[in-house]
Image: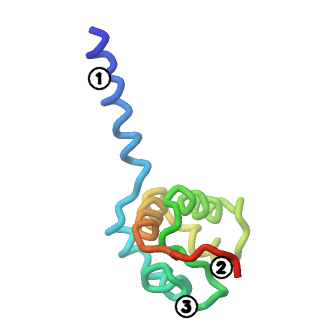
């Protein structure tokens, strides 16, 4: 009885765990508008814009949600993030997190 109750509780929380992550392939398609500043795969060629490749997925989700809500201020990003859905944010974060990031994190 206890085992089946535990199993049921685990299965009930599974959809919430899975939904926290996005779909990288969908994010790749949605990232077309991001490429002008952040590069084809999230590696910017202009130091004015941050590299997104290899960044932590949860960080990217939070940053985009904060731009969308206005908690994080940037006129350019507010315009791009404003119309994003929660799923768009998850997918974009999954795409950029799946890319190879910078290998050298030293400060120069």
Q: Residues within 10 Å of mark 1 (few under 14, many from 20)?
A: few
Measure the alpha-carbon separation of dots 3 and 2: 18 Å
Which residue extends farthest bottom? 45
Q: Earlier in the sequence, mark 3 or mark 1?
A: 1
Residue 106 image label: none
Say which residue appears at 64% left-offset and 60% top-offset: 66
Give how far across and how far down residue 76 sits, in percent.
65, 79
Say which residue appears at 53% left-offset and 59% top-offset: 61
Q: Which residue is mark 2?
A: 76
Apparent side of residue 49 relative to residue 11 in the rendered image (left or right): right
Which element is circle 2 on? helix
Q: Which residue is mark 1?
A: 7
Image position of 2 with respect to 15: above or below: above
Image position of 55 with respect to 34: above or below: above
Measure the alpha-carbon separation of dots 3 and 1: 49 Å
Give how far across and how far down residue 28 sits, in percent.
37, 74
Q: Which residue is mark 3?
A: 45
Depth check, mark 2 against mark 1: the one in front is: 1
Apparent side of residue 81 relative to residue 72 in the rendered image (left or right): left
Image position of 27 with respect to 65: above or below: below
Q: Which quarter of the picture shows residue 3? A: top left
Q: Residues within 10 Å of mark 2 (few under 14, many from 20)?
A: few
């Amino acid at each position: 009885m206890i085992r089946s109750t535990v199993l049921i509780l685990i299965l009930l929380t599974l959809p919430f765990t899975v939904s926290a992550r996005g779909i990288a392939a969908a994010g790749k398609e949605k990232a077309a508008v991001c490429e002008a500043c952040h590069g084809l795969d999230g590696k910017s060629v202009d130091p004015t814009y941050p590299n997104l490749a290899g960044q932590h997925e949860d960080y990217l989700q939070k940053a985009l949600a904060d731009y969308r809500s206005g908690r994080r201020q940037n006129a350019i990003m507010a315009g791009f993030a404003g119309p994003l859905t929660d799923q768009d944010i998850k997918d974009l974060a999954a795409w950029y997190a799946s890319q190879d990031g910078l290998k050298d994190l030293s400060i120069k």
